[in-house]
Amino acid sequence: VIVHMQEGIAGSLTHEDRARDVRESDHVPHQQTLLNAFRARRLPVIFVNVDNPTDSPALFPLYGTMFEFMRQQAEMRRAGDDDLKRRDVIAELAPLAGEPVLFNRFLGAFTYSGLDETLKAHNVDTLVIIGMALHVAVFNATIQAVDLSYSVIVPQDACVPTLRANRTPDMLKIRETFLEMFSRYALVTTADD
């Protein structure tokens, strides 16, 4: 399951610094390695992109800056011609024919996306979750998956941190804390493993 690796969050239609950080990190090549391995073994590959809420502005203050970002994204979608392009998976991970691209609302990959039903249709009981961003979307997807009785594997080097998360000591500490928390719910490993 690849979460939120879309043009409006990790690609060219997002904030220039974030797009550069994603491209300059080694996370996307690790994602490509996993994607190729799953495809070669004919294992299900499912993309989940966020379709930011446009009808729940009252919720934004409850969740702080993340919802402010989502509100801004929703406004740009309503105002611009790039609406559909913002939802596209980045070119480096482009889905093949037959690979579902689902859309969730808010932060969790399972929220209103049909992901659980899609996984059950493929008889999946163990998930490998990768994507953007480790301590937001990937973490939420992991918690939701465990709550739905899936076993979860999180290759940490295929999970993009949030903007500049690897550049400051405070953000590195947050990343380490989240990886420690992940280990309570999932097998934390690497793409090569």
Image (cartoon, rainbow, N blue to C red):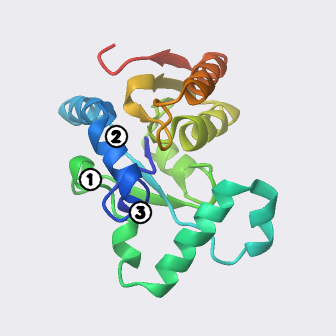
Amino acid type of disc 2? Pro
At x 24%, y 33%, the residue is 29
Neighbours of disc 3 within 10 Å: few (<14), some (14-19), many (20+): many
Element carrying mark 2: loop
Instruction: Categorize mark 1 by other alpha carbons within 10 Å: few (<14), some (14-19), many (20+).
Output: some
Give the answer, above or below, for where 99 lies relative to 167: below
Circle 3 — which element? helix
Residue at the front extreme, as displayed? 168
Q: Residue at x 36, y 78 (%)?
A: 82
Mark nearer the viewer, 1 or 3 = 3
Crowd tier of the residue under label 2, counting other residues whose Cα lies within 10 Å: few below 14, some 14–19, many 20 or above: some
Amino acid under label 1? Pro
Q: Nearer the viewer, mark 1 or mark 2?
A: 1
Element type where label 1 sits in the image: loop
- Who is closer to the viewer here, 18 or 110? 18
Query: Which is more N-terminal, label 2 or label 1?
Result: 2
Q: Label 3 belongs to which residue?
A: 8
Q: Quadrant location of the N terminus?
A: top left
* Kind of residue at disc 3: Gly
Q: Position of residue 123 (x, y in %)?
A: 46, 37
The percent coordinates of residue 86 (x first, y second) are 39, 68
- Which of the two residues, 100 or 77, is positioned nearer the viewer here? 77
Q: CA distance from mark 1 to mark 2?
A: 11 Å
Residue assigned mark 1: 95
Mark 2 = which residue? 44
Residue 12 drawn at (x, y percent): 30, 61
Alpha carbon separation for disc pair 1 and 3: 16 Å
Q: Quadrant of the C terminus?
A: top left
